[in-house]
Amino acid sequence: MLDPLYKIISPKLGAQMYKWACDLYPICRSLSGKGVRETLHYFQDLLPTLTIHAIPSGTKAFDWEVPNEWNIREAWIADEYGNRIVDFSNNNLHIVGYSIPTDKVMELEELQEHLYSLPDQPDFIPYVTSYYVNRWGFCLAHTQRQKLKQGKYHVYIDSTLVPGHINYGELILPGETTDEILISTYICHPSMANNELSGPVVACAIAQWLSNLPSRKRRYTYRILFLVETIGSIIYLSHHLEYLRKHLKAGFVLTCVGDERDISYLPSRTGNTLADLVALHVLESYTERFTSYTFLDRGSDERQYCSPNVDLPVVSIMRSKYGTYPEYHTSGDNLSLITPSGLYGALRLYAAAISILERNDVYRVTVMGEPQLGKRGLYPTISTKESGAKVRDLMNVIAYCDGKADVLQLAKRINLPALRVLELMEPLISAGLLEKVE
Amino acid sequence: MLDPLYKIISPKLGAQMYKWACDLYPICRSLSGKGVRETLHYFQDLLPTLTIHAIPSGTKAFDWEVPNEWNIREAWIADEYGNRIVDFSNNNLHIVGYSIPTDKVMELEELQEHLYSLPDQPDFIPYVTSYYVNRWGFCLAHTQRQKLKQGKYHVYIDSTLVPGHINYGELILPGETTDEILISTYICHPSMANNELSGPVVACAIAQWLSNLPSRKRRYTYRILFLVETIGSIIYLSHHLEYLRKHLKAGFVLTCVGDERDISYLPSRTGNTLADLVALHVLESYTERFTSYTFLDRGSDERQYCSPNVDLPVVSIMRSKYGTYPEYHTSGDNLSLITPSGLYGALRLYAAAISILERNDVYRVTVMGEPQLGKRGLYPTISTKESGAKVRDLMNVIAYCDGKADVLQLAKRINLPALRVLELMEPLISAGLLEKVE
Amino acid sequence: MLDPLYKIISPKLGAQMYKWACDLYPICRSLSGKGVRETLHYFQDLLPTLTIHAIPSGTKAFDWEVPNEWNIREAWIADEYGNRIVDFSNNNLHIVGYSIPTDKVMELEELQEHLYSLPDQPDFIPYVTSYYVNRWGFCLAHTQRQKLKQGKYHVYIDSTLVPGHINYGELILPGETTDEILISTYICHPSMANNELSGPVVACAIAQWLSNLPSRKRRYTYRILFLVETIGSIIYLSHHLEYLRKHLKAGFVLTCVGDERDISYLPSRTGNTLADLVALHVLESYTERFTSYTFLDRGSDERQYCSPNVDLPVVSIMRSKYGTYPEYHTSGDNLSLITPSGLYGALRLYAAAISILERNDVYRVTVMGEPQLGKRGLYPTISTKESGAKVRDLMNVIAYCDGKADVLQLAKRINLPALRVLELMEPLISAGLLEKVE
């Protein structure tokens, strides 16, 4: 299983994913509305079996209620001379998400109460939303805001905030068993690249990779979700929690997987699930350096997946984590921040994690004492000063195949990457020296 | 319960405790006798429900037997000219504790066998006792000893060592439950300040603080003991061990809590009792720096409370620990060593520990996933780049209220002081989002 | 038991062991044959109850089969002029172990394929064997090899490789119980000193030391084995595994115990057996510095004793470990590498480990609270500033004799060598203050 799962991940996929991000970048996504549906249809073209679901406003989900659907056509601020000094059509971050319709002339002083800018990052437009309290507002660069003169301004917002739906995409790839691996990503942010478009495009590449395998080549069933953050995962959990509790073995929240500045790990709440073990192993084995955060640093849908009453085995492997890089949640988080290579690096780590999970079995050596490898052509038949070192890794695999450790535990004990352990195991399994413990 | 328990600890109590220490300093305490009773009566005036007990000489207690009662009226060494060169009336450390009556003229050479001084600390009078073997002796500064000339000396000790009693004081403050917290301190040392008067005066301040609360405001019953060291705690345990084993949840030996040079922690024998957990949490949360000792460094009544067959959950939070500061067990440990602020600092740490223990419950979040705090006014309704950080502590409390961790464990996991955790919990409990797990 | 077990280890034994190594050094040992039997008879003279066993070629043992017996009388390479330029009679490392009979003249080019030398250690003759595939070959210093001129060479090997036996020696010293301690060493290497003769001679000294005690002075039964490496321990385990699983409490592979350059520790596979605990304690208590290896660095018969299906509690305390010193498996590992003092140092560590195991009981203090040691003459009757420190170790022994910790665990908790703990316990046991927990 290993080769088809892992080795077909081509570096060319980096450019592919980057192109998808470019296509999706201009769309104005929010918690609900046409932008979300347009985004989901884009992925449906790439993943034909992706199902798009719609949950009506007012639906209860745990402690929450699905809000109205927001759509926006036009939004601007014009000065006394009719110049549109801030215009949503230039950058969809200019409008506070879920702004209510407005058409009003006002003095600068009144307008200021509806403006959002970042004094410490004066060139960036901030990203602001107000999903659950009715407001309107505009976001702009602080340098621009400081130049605003006294006078009258015309504010125009052509939006609707009325009962409708929240949407999400769901792709189920059945495997040999009903045990599941979850890939969850989100599609509710307007034009931003590392957080968020990197997440959906890497998730899509993983989904294509797994889809291209025949199902008997997948031990696990894969559940790949394109949600809106927070309310989306809460809705999803409110419908699927009991099933996931029974079947989910490991899950990953894909976000901030596009730049090249860092590699990060965010554990589950308990920190010791299978998802934690495989993620840490992959990061320790296949990166030179990574930043390890704690669950106290969480910020995406693991907040729901790992909440005390839910406690699913879900973690994140990221590039630069949300909240830690200066462009986060601003117009600076644009397509120049992410790269094909950054996306590909994240994809490879996830593919390694999945490839290991697919074969993370427990093996037992079938003979007492060390097997005689020489007669099977697996050990040098002449013993010199260095002959032992040549087969040390192989002998270590045998020494720890005790019917108790799974491949991840074994790899940790003998200080080898798990995929290398699996390679070393192959001739031993063929020779009947190792057998799987069910 | 939190506010009345913790916030009424006023800094003015520092001066109050220091005054008590000044009043008690001149009294000649020992293992038994009038000085002990006088000291206990002093505390009885401050704590009217304090009971004074008397155990007769000869009473067996575990491996020990209560010794005779010692009282002393006069003790001096006079030179050939009748000058009293060493006189108990000047400093009660001059006499070896439990010295037998003597009235004798002798040469310097013979006298030397009964003198105790400290060559390395030549200006201090050492503190020496001989409770269980009949002796007599005088303690003096080494500088003075070296000036003694050949000649005859008259030694006079007017003491009695006859069957009598060992005394102790016991104050029980009943609470909502019969679960108990123990405060144990000792009153057997003559004029010394950090070790020992700081202990009884801080214990007395804690007792007054707790007494002034109505009993329904105390979950725990408090047992506050003024004992003589070693034999006192052995006697006490020999009568109360079975009860304490059932009811004692945490206990503290109060000693060396008066100076400002250090803050110290001495764990229980096993090191993992509730008393250890709360003491370590308080020290880590509310001090800048403290010295952590091991049980191998023990030296007071935890030797009995934590002995292998007893193993009660008892620890010490101290200022400069016995044995570690130069003035220990000498006349240098006088009232200039302790300060109102030093005493108050220790009192605050103990009050914090008790306040946490009183509310160290296990809570569980009542909803699935994260609760929607915005609709309850507990979360910003507008989402900006920084809005999450503002409520991070609150969200972390929720994320770890899993029905398993108590407040101390929760505080440790989310790196907040337990009293701050309790503050954060209050609105969540009021909103019905957290419920106590019985 | 302590004194006879430990204190009779005299430093003179170092010279004794060194002499045995000198006697045994010239013998040409291999996996089988006369050299092994000669070596075993040498030890039988020293240990009269040593039994020599013979296992026929062709016998199956786990995954292995006993190979033919190899004996060699003569082996040389002669140049065109009849000069024997390489001659087994000069150094038995010159012949590749298990070389088949040969009598042939050939060109240098053909000869080269049968020569083994070490370019990086040009003055040393390497040690090479080919037990399981028929070959012939010679080992020589690389400097000599480089001087070989074109021309014809006469190769002559007078060896036999025919059905015979593999031999081993076994000595059982019965003790008070059938619980066992295993000492295993090997005797299959030709003339090399640290690896291997140091192992058998230290094992022999331990055996003599233990033999000289009456059996009622030994709690444990001792099983002392002189095997050939790998196939020897596999044969032995194939006959005795079930019994050892039930009775073996701790075992040691004795190898590389002769030089003075290092002290090393090789743990068992699981790393937490009684053998590990006692070895680590001895090394931490009685050496200034030692090198701690992991089971991944293994290389001798613990490979069999600790294999997954066997998992006996076996470790190694070594001087310079096989594979880590430059002379390893070459003619440089000769009698100048090992010293009486190096051998004696290893013997002392093993004797300490055994002495501790013999008395590694669990004790419980018989009184509640601290015992009154003063009345028993075990505590100063006068209390001064320093009196407590004088008896601190004694008090710590008492404080941790809780009926749960054995002597090794106790020693670790109170930071004292276990043999010192046993000394401190003696007067307490005599006074009835400690009792053994069965």
Image (tube, coloured by chain):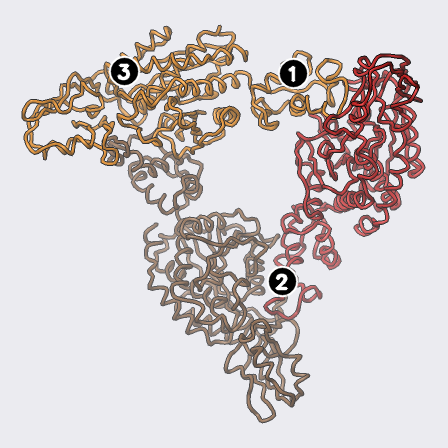
Chain colours: A orange, B brown, C red
Q: What is the CA distance from the residue labelled 1 to the residue labelled 3?
A: 49 Å
Q: Is residue C234 above or below residue C387?
A: above
Examine the image and state in which quarter residue B18 appears.
bottom left
Relative to B104, A223 lies left or right: left
Asked if both marks, 1 and 3, belong to the same chain, the answer given is yes
The reply, left or right, for residue A50 in relation to residue C418 is: left
Position of residue A118 in the picture relative to residue C419 (left or right):
left
Q: Amino acid at mark 2?
A: Ala
- Disc 2 is placed on an element classified as helix
Q: Quadrant of residue A303?
A: top left
Q: Nearer the viewer, mark 1 or mark 3?
A: 3
Instruction: Establish if A330 lies above or below C22.
Output: above
Can marks 1 and 2 be said to lie on one chain?
A: no
Does the image show residue C327?
yes
Within 10 Å of disc 3 (Cα), the crowding (few <14, some 14-19, many 20+) is many
Determine the residue located farthest toward the bottom in the rendered image. Answer: B81
Instruction: Identify the amino acid type marked 1.
Output: Glu
Q: Where residue C389 is drawn, which disc sits there?
A: 2
Closer-to-camera residue (A428/C82): C82
Name the kind of residue labelled 3 in the image: Val
Q: Residue at x 36, y 34 (%)?
A: B365
Q: Residue at x 48, y 7 (%)?
A: A213
Q: Nearer the viewer, residue A376 or B366?
A: A376
Q: Secondary structure at mark 1?
A: strand
**Dot 3 corresponds to which residue?**
A36
Where, quadrant-wise, is the C terminus of chain C in this rendering? top right
- Residue A402, percent across and down? 65, 24
Q: Which residue is mark 1?
A: A435
Marked residue nearer the N-terminal end (1 or 3): 3
